[in-house]
Amino acid sequence: MLYLSFFFTVALAVYTVFIHREEKSKRHKHRLSQVKGELDGLSMEAQDEAAVKSESALGNLLKNLFRPLRRSFTRRLQGWEETRIEHKLQQAGRPFNMSPIDYRILQLSLLILLPVLFGGYSFILGVGIGFKILFILAGFIAALLLPGYYLKLKTRQRSRFALRELPDVLDLLTVSLEAGLGFDSAISKMVAKKEGVLAGEFRRCLEEIRLGKTRREALTGVKERLVLDEMKVLISSILQAEKLGIGLVQVLRVQSHEVREKRKQRAEEEAMKAPVKMLFPLVLFIFPSIFIVLLGPAAIQFIQVFSNNKP
């Protein structure tokens, strides 16, 4: 059990580091392939097809290993549950290109692996049977909570990136519309010039429009995939302006100003919270160290003086 726990821990750590580096490398290669495709005149569909063909050998190996399990989950996973997981994965940016079946397989793997690891650690520590049971229960709880927590973490990260990119995207759309381009053409121009969360979502929006969805349905999909209040207000304003025949340039300019004002107010709010957040480290770590440095020598001298004065 000791060697098994050590092996699984090292393997999990190595795989985590490797897959993180591979994901970053894949994003860089995808961006380079987009630039090369634009220079060579390749279409977006051809670029996406090339990106699919260049998937890692490790990912293909894992898919082949878990293929029987995938078939079993495909038969058992209900439609409403698959839709719910798919929605969460889309909001998180589909990490590691996971499907709902892959997510369920990950949950099952963690439910088997983490209790074994925690149980192995309890044997290493040599604790009693009660603590061993607690360790195994902690492994089960961690296996149940970690996948959902990871998706929430990725969703918040995407929301922060999208909020950071939103003012520049709105400015670029406004300039394109003022230059005489239509809204779809302005989005296409923005997607070609920008890279990031918003550019990826609007790129998907354009693809859905080309595949037959209405503009309202495609933009509503963008609003649902991004957990961001500013984005919901923006999409609702665009759809309302399109319905009422209002000019989009003024709407986008107002939205850009409001987003920048909210970002400024949010920064001021965080600055106001900073002194309160700094209070606890000051009291717990910095002040005791200062007291030890300042009062320590004096305390030692007092002790020496009183000890020497004793009869």
Image (cartoon, rainbow, N blue to C red):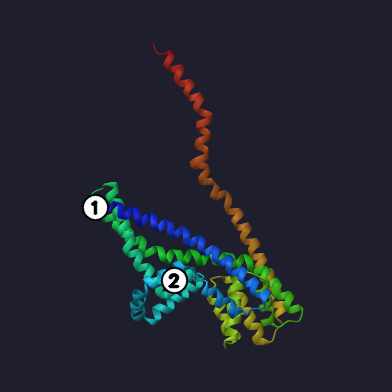
Which of the marked residues, 1 or 2, is nearer the chain's N terminus?
A: 2
Residue 103 % position (x, y) = 41, 71
Q: Decide if residue 134 is on the left or right side of residue 186.
A: left
Residue 85 % position (x, y) = 43, 74
**Residue at the image point whose x is 58% and y is 80% from the top:** 45
User: Which quadrant holds the C terminus?
Assistant: top left
Answer few, some or many: residues within 10 Å of disc 1's Cα (few below 14, many 20 plus, some between 14 and 19): few
Answer few, some or many: residues within 10 Å of disc 2's Cα (few below 14, many 20 plus, some between 14 and 19): few
Q: Which mark is residue 130?
A: 1
Answer whether residue 217 is visible to the viewer in this image: yes
Question: The disc labelled 1 sits on which kind of residue?
Answer: Gly
Quarter residue 42 falls in = bottom right
Camera-side mark, 1 or 2: 2
Quarter residue 204 falls in = bottom right
Local SS, label 2: helix
Q: CA distance from mark 1 to mark 2?
A: 42 Å
Q: Which mark is residue 60?
A: 2
Residue 90 % position (x, y) = 50, 74
Q: Nearer the viewer, residue 267 or 105?
A: 105
Is 59 drawn above or below residue 267 in the view shown?
A: below
Is 270 drawn above or below residue 231 in the view shown?
A: above
Q: Nearer the viewer, residue 87 or 238?
A: 87
User: Which quadrant holds the N terminus?
Assistant: bottom left
**Residue at the image point whose x is 64% and y is 74% from the top:** 37
**Residue at the image point whose x is 45% and y is 69% from the top:** 59
**Residue at the image point whose x is 47% and y is 76% from the top:** 87
Residue 159 % position (x, y) = 56, 67
Q: Decide if residue 124 is on the left or right side of residue 231.
A: left
> Farthest right residue?
179
